[in-house]
Image (cartoon, rainbow, N blue to C red):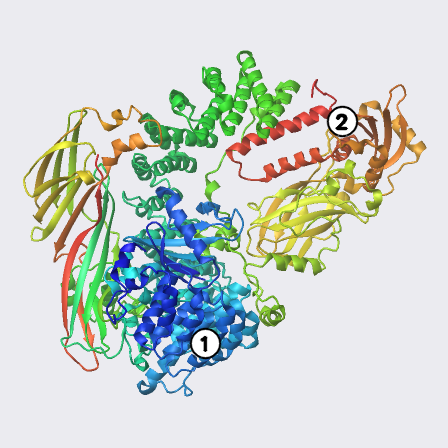
Amino acid sequence: MSSSNGTMGVGAGGGGGGSDSRFFTTQKKGEMHELRLELHSTDRNVKVDAVKKVIASMTVGKDVSSLFTDVLNCVQTGNIELKKLVYLYLINYAKSQPELTLLAVNTFVKDANDPNPLIRALAVRTMGCIRVDRITEYLCEPLGRALRDEDPDPLAFGDFKRIGIVRLLYVRKTAAVCVAKLYDIAPDLVQERGFIETLHDLISDSNPSVVANGVAALSEISETSGRDVMRINASVLQKLLAALNECTEWGQVFILDSLAKYTPAEAREAEGIIERVTPRLQHANSAVVMSAVKVILSYMDVMAGGRGGGGDGAAESIRALTRKLAPPLVTLLNSEPEIQYVALRNINLIVQKRPSILENEIKVFFCKYNDPIYVKMEKLEIIIKLVNERNVDQVLLELKEYATEVDVDFVRKSVSAIGRCAVKLERAAERCIGVLLELIQTKVNYVVQESVIVIKDIFRRYPNRYESIIATLCDNLDTLDEPQAKASMIWIIGEYAERIDNADELLDTFLETFEEEDPAVQLQLLTATVKCFLKNPEETQDMVQKVLDLATEESDNPDLRDRGFIYWRLLSTDPEAAKLVVLGDKPVIEDDTFRLEPNLLNVLVGQIATLSSIYHKPPEAFVVRANRGPTGGDDLGLGDVGEEIEEGDEEEDYEDENDVNGGGGSGGGDLLDMGGLSVNGNAAAPTGPVAGDMFSLSSPAAAAVDPAALMSKVCAPEKSGGIELWAGFRQVGGSVVMELDVRNVSSNVPVSNLAIQLNKNSFGLSPANQQIICNPPVPLGGSGRQSVVLVVNPNMLVQVPDGQPASPQIQVAIKNITTGLVFYFAANFSLDALFSADGALERAAFIESWKSIDDKKELYGTVGDLPPHSTDIDQVAAKFKMHRIFLIARRPVPNAEGQEVAYFSMRTTTGMVFMAELTFKKGVHAAKVCIKTEHVAYGGLAKRTIESMKALGVALYEEVAAIESGVVCSFVEAEAFAAMRCSIIIRSGLTAGNVPEGL
Amino acid sequence: MVASAIFITDLTGKPLISRNYRGDIPLTAAIDRFASYLNEVEDEMKKPVFHVDSGGEVLNVDDVGCTGVGGETFVYVQHSNLYLCGVTCKNSNIALMLTYLYQLTSLFQDYFTTLNEESIRDNFVIIYELLDETMDHGLPQSLDSTILRQFITQEGNRMADDSKSKPPVALTNAVSWRAEGIKHKKNEIFLDVVEKLNLLVSANGTVLHSEINGAVKMKSFLSGMPELKLGLNDKLVFEAAGRGGSSGGASSSRAGKSVELEDIKFHQCVRLARFENDRTISFIPPDGEFDLMTYRLDTHVKPLIWVEAVVEPHRGSRIEYMIKTRSQFKSRSVANNVEIIIPVPPDVDSPSFKSSVGNVTYLPDKDCVVWTIKQFHGGREYLMRAHFGLPSISREEADGGNINKGSGGGSGADMSWKKPIGVKFEIPYFTVSGIQVRYLKIIERSGYQALPWVRYITANGDYQLRMA
């Protein structure tokens, strides 16, 4: 507070009229004492002024808690203003003085019985705000009375008695909110006293304001407890809809928001409710409009999905509704900028959900010069979503206009928007590029840089189509000073090196400053130089050597080093393979990388107008789930609520993760899961330590347990309606089992019932039972493991063509019975799941077979980088035994000090026999592998099985699988992907016995 | 569900008054975070809604949730030298919070005439009372000033006899916006139809976007509980009536023009369900001033006042403007207080003007020229020439040819005057949409005669013409 107010004096005699600022007069020493005296004054005016001074001090953050008892003394007054001030003081300091607060209880109880309803309501309202446990006991009695604060004669509604009733309603509507407050502090008390039931009674109240507050309180409690205590049914629905027409604007929002959480049983019901809600679109309050839009959009899905509703009729009604929704949405853009911002974030969702609503309204999203920047940015997003071939010319003119404005971020986003139009609309791409070239001519630094970045995206979308503009880009090389722009330009140079005369020179200039560049630029420089080298090896040999040296020796960045090494090995091993990898086709990018996944979108549409719709995240992503009452001992009380409520209520949108985990543990669904892998945690490590590294397991004690499956991600949620799948194979009690981890990433329909089918495969495997029941269902955010028992069925066997290796791939189709969605993926089978327990050959038989197989059928390989202790043959043998790979014999290699050979055999349940020879050398953490088998086609798989018992190799395969299954590849990922493929080739090169020098 | 707490700060984020409704967030720490947001985040990065995670980091809107759950969301509006801010740790209805904050500002304005730092301090007791009454447990309750005034008054020492203070009937009544027993000596009602024209014209002269924002504003001084019915020349009404055939040819031909209002918003007193049924606007009005309805029309409107600018810059010496303006409405209408605002470069000097009508002034602090025409009759055309000197070295050259470097400081300078031309005007007795009030029926039990007064006016809204 500025000191100028201090000059106004204390003016204690001042009665009415004087400004309150005099109470802020700075306090001198001893003033506390003075205040205390004034608080005890018999003069009411002095007393009131003293309390005001206390409140003023409180307002500016001074600690006046020492006056607690003195202020509390003043509460015994008939003066309602004084009472309000004391109550305000109490709310503020009750927490710090819980003992003393109890002294106020008497007054509260007395006030709650006051003949004046204002005082009754005030007392109940304030008591609810005092979050002191011990006061809650005293709150229940008056609250119970206040909730039923009612005229005994319900028929007395004539004008004659009306006024009296209305006053009582004021207390009731305050009491309704107070139940929600009490629930926060003491949920068990609310339950015990049956207050939730009382709230339900209030929904039938004759007064709309009471209904609205009752609804608000019930929604609050539902949110706090995580259970639907609202329980909307047909009769509640009618009452809510009736109150909707009558209550205040805020009450309308409460009611609409709780309607939005309800799912109508069938199309006709949905249509009926929509009809009653539609007039709200005409309300002046934007919040009412948005909540009405939310209800309508959420219910439209039910209308569309209605089976009996008659498809044509429903479609016609939806079209009509679509027309009705556009004008109110557009009008929201005439509100205050803050509301516009909220509206635009929501419209962003709406145009994704139902593009037709605003398809003809793109012009209203054109930016005004004086729009706040945050509004402009959101408008741009919408423009990009609405642009189509009909309006693209106008949009381009508009975007070009924005690109000359002052705000740098806005200009950049506009330029980038032009690029996104090009990526989205193939037929307009050329025009977009034209505009970008014009913009580059302005030579404005950041415009040029942003243009380069988006042109790179256009090249990735339409390869080899617009390279004629590269010359223009190259003219502007020296303007580029931002990492992203540089990286993009370098990528373009590398990608089109053969069409740029001096590509090597251009790269060379960048290389001069290699060490100072941003890591993103360094990575691109490395890749581009390698590309350049592969296209024109003669001239760029020195350059590539230089960049590889820089990357592998000078850099501290592990990404850069790794990529450098990979390229280096690749180039030195097999330049032709390098060409295939590095210059291979890259995935073409899609324009919908900025679209939300459909199931998440549905969740968010149900959250319109809430924070969730601003952040485009489901609420549980950012809101701490309230623990169920702070008192701790409330489980019993809640148990009752739970049982009572759970009956008719299985469609709760969000389940607590803990619920799921708890249920999963007790459910009978995963008896088969004894692998010891963490199933519940969302972040469960994909590489189980048990299976990940067979060599390293030192304790054979675990031999009785079947080894766990090595899980890898096989299906991304984009393909499968929000469900992520991880699969792995293992053997359990003699049968082959496919383990499926079902992770529900964004489907708000819990995963409960799936059907599975396998395509014909190299092993003749098919599921014993096509149905997979998830018990308990996997809710949003949860996960669960299912085991599918596979049997060998000769009809399912694919004959492997001569001379070709058998494919480990098993193609799987899964249908989600609940949603009707079918999706496909492929999982790599691990052969050891097929090895049978009788795979140990007689020693003599082994030698016989070994000799009988032609040496040409041998397969060689090397396993490197083994953990030190895993070269001990005893341990290896024990570990292998778990996987039913049996040690037959071992012997030292003659004439070679420290080398030892071990022979193993394995037999599949289908009768294929494999024999393996592993050579170890003391002090070398590697082993040579040699496989002999009559079933040559499967030999490779057997070899890989043995090799895979090394952590690093496994991890690598998995990453590739993850990237391959991911639909979206970012710019960086695409290159990483190429590098990954290349490392696989190196591995196969290595196994071919081709170990290059120095690696 | 809605707000954990509401607080008001000055422009630096220093708290003036606060109310913690739910006790689920540490309020003092939250206010500190808000202050550091105001002071530390760059202006162009600020958004009216922002999230601070549990570690105290302000998150970009797309990153919310990426650092785990928890933290608080702030939502704020600015009014004069104040920020009104709501804070929540739940998934609150943010639209509701914003509309509450806006209505709170108008409520305070209604109570204290002006709302600023001083009036907050001068009325802190009453503000506490209003905060207490308008929101409970973070849920907005009644914000109607006419109702609240009946039991929260400004006189410091009011209500000596406390038994008199009762909650007003209207607070929980179905008619929550009007108290019973209102008496006026003269029963009058004033009706203003105000239309604002939003216009955006591209540099090549095509109208990119035109839109009419209309409002029917009322000032009601009627006694008792009057039932009102308002008739407009709303196209849908006529279509409905025309099919009914009862109104006959005479009235529909007399109506001649009817208007299709695209999106109508009503004051809460209007019975929406009834309107949805038969397009009747029926209501019990609040007492005093209020906006009965607002509407929007997206029709293509010919720009009422057209402006063309020809700019001839001569680098390093001078810059010349030729501005032509034309009124494109009927000649019997007059636009009053027309201002045409033409942006100019920031470093011009020695202005000289020549115009066929009106006054021209150069406003150096706003970098623009304002051409004022007091009365602009329909169907006229005027011309104005402006001439400025330019310094021999332009600002960007003075910056050392730094145009292409840095983040726009240099290039901003040569574009900042590319602002669009703005126009302000008011045309009385005229609505650009053609909307007309056909009747206003007032029925009250006591059967008094009331006088309705109707006025029309069209003014500029967001009226921008881009310069070539």
Q: Is residue A568 left or right of residue B290?
A: right
Residue A711 visible in the current orientation: yes
Q: Position of residue B308 (x, y in %)?
A: 16, 38
Sequence-first disc among 2 and 1: 1
Chain containing mark 2? A
Which residue is at a point 46% across and 50% down the rendered structure image?
B52
Q: Nearer the viewer, residue A439 or A818?
A: A439
Residue A897, by quadrant, is top right
Question: Under tag 2, what secondary structure?
Answer: strand
Is residue A73 toward the left or the right of residue A407 in the image?
right
Residue B118: assigned label: none
| Residue A838 spot, x, y in % from top left | 87, 42
Q: Please tell me how crowded label 1 is: few (under 14), some (14-19), or many (20+) other residues with Cα within 10 Å.
A: many
Secondary structure category for the residue under label 1: helix
| Camera-side mark, 2 or 1 | 1
B381 horizontally vs A479: left or right: left
Is A54 situated above or below A572? Answer: below
Q: Which amino acid type is shown beneath numbered disc 1?
A: Leu
Q: Which residue is mark 1?
A: A202
Amino acid type for the residue under numbered disc 2: Thr
Which residue, given by chain and number where applicable, does mark 2 sit on? A862
User: In the rendered image of this protein, does residue B110 appear above or below residue B326?
Assistant: below
Q: Chain of mark 1?
A: A
Of residue B5 and residue A316, the one placed in the foreground of this image is B5
Q: Position of residue A904 (x, y in %)?
A: 85, 33
Q: Quadrant of the C terminus of chain A?
A: top right
> How many marks are shown on the rendered structure?
2
Farthest residue toward the right? A844
Which residue is painted at 13% across and 53% down in the image? B427
Q: The N terminus of chain A is located in which quarter?
A: bottom left
Q: Residue furthest top?
A: A538
x and y percentages locating residue B62 in the rendered image: 46, 45
